[in-house]
Amino acid sequence: MQASFKANKLQLNGTSELHPNGYRRNFNNLIEKPEPTAVQSFAEAIASLTGEQIADGVLTTANNLQIA
């Protein structure tokens, strides 16, 4: 079986005055291997621009699989 990169998605979870019970923000089309510091900086920039608090995130990677 061979795997090749297809896509990365980042979901940031947090709270804000408008969403005290929480929210999810999704970002698609990330590079194949984002550095942890780049993801952290991106999350901090989003928090700064929106005024929201980000609690955590989920990075999901999709691969194409060739089975044979």
Image: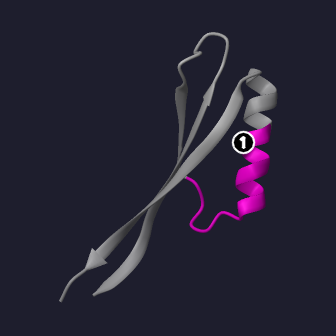
Quadrant in the picture for the C terminus: bottom left
From the image, tell me which residue sits under label 1: 43
Q: Position of residue 51 (x, y in %)?
A: 77, 21
| Placement of 23 over or under 58, stated as above or below | above
Range shown magenta: 30-44
Query: Which residue: 67% across, 11% down?
Result: 17
Left or right: where 3 falls relative to 21:
left
Q: Position of residue 11 (x, y in %)?
A: 53, 42
Left or right: where 62 falls relative to 39:
left
Mark 1: give few (<14), some (14-19) or many (20+) Cα within 10 Å: many
Q: Quadrant of residue 16?
A: top right
Closer to us: 51 or 33: 51
Query: Which residue: 68% across, 34% down?
Result: 54
Query: Which residue: 59% across, 46% down?
Result: 57
| Placement of 19 over or under 23, stated as above or below | above
Q: Is residue 60 magenta?
A: no
Q: Position of residue 4 (x, y in %)?
A: 41, 76
Query: Which residue: 73% across, 33% down?
Result: 46
The image shows a total of numbered marks equal to 1
Q: Is residue 39 magenta?
A: yes
Q: Position of residue 47 (x, y in %)?
A: 75, 31
- Colour convention of the picture: one colour
